Image (spheres, rainbow, N blue to C red):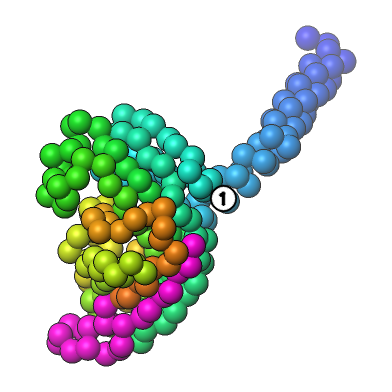
Amino acid sequence: MPFKGWITLVLSAVLVTGCSADTNKDISTTPQNESNKKETKKQSGEQTFTDSSQASDDTGLTEINKKVEDQDGAITLKKYAKVNKEQQADSISLTIDEVKVIHYAPSLDLIDFFHGYTKQDEFPYVRVNVKIANQGKETVHFNPVSTIKTDQGETVTWEEDFYLEELNGKIEPGKEKVGSLGFILNKTNADKLNSITITSSEVVNDQKKSISNPLTFNVDF
């Protein structure tokens, strides 16, 4: 091949390679891809509260008296409070994010499960969304909700939580727990409920010694 032909061939290859690199660069920096990256980062940094396998999905339910139905039954939101308050007990930080009072009619396949908590086939319950963080250097034991007392005189305890997300008990240093607890109300009229008082447990160390007083949150609806 003549020398001039070799030059033409080399220049053509350089141009093709350059166009390919520019194309790849354009694809990787499109606004859509940047948007997706930001959205993924945003989602990964958020603490979320998921629906319970024992109850209908209320995660987006904030409108009073709105009803939602799914395969787990039907729920109606009776009371709602966006609390978003944090308190400290020794090394434990406890945030009550939001509280809902929900009337629930479970599906037939869940009624037997709930008969371990109530004799009613339909009932109101309190959902409490919490965030717990151990900011200390030692493992401790803590229950974010030890009792809930309604303004109608009913008290429920931590043993009656049916969400079963393992938020009670041991929490290691530097660790966080985020989730929900659910408590059935057997003696409270949800429509007339105006407030509840949430009390945590004490913080207890590995030697079973109490190192703090309980925390109290007063929630008005």
Q: Which residue is mark 1?
A: 41
Q: Dot 1: within a 10 Å radius of its alpha carbon, few (fewer than 14), some, or many (20 or more) residues?
A: few
Q: Position of residue 98 (x, y in %)?
A: 46, 60
Q: Report which quarter residue 59 is drawn in.
A: top left
Report the side of 31 relative to 113 (left or right): right
Mark yes or no: residue 131 visible. Answer: no
Q: Is residue 221 above or below residue 16?
A: below
Name the residue at the top extreme: 1
Report the side of 30 relative to 41 (left or right): right
Say whether residue 204 is magenta. Answer: yes
Residue plotted at (30% across, 59% down): 188
- Give the SS element for disc 1: helix
The span shown in magenta is 201-221
Residue plotted at (74% across, 27% down): 23
Residue plotted at (17% across, 64% down): 159
Nearest to the observer: residue 190 or residue 184:
190
Q: Position of residue 208 (x, y in %)?
A: 15, 85
Report the side of 174 relative to 38 (left or right): left
Majority secondary structure in the magenta region: loop
Residue plotted at (80% across, 19% down): 12
Nearest to the observer: residue 1 or residue 118:
118
Q: Is residue 154 above or below residue 92?
A: above
Q: Position of residue 1 (x, y in %)?
A: 78, 9
Nearest to the observer: residue 47 or residue 28:
47
Q: Report which quarter residue 186 is drawn in.
A: bottom left
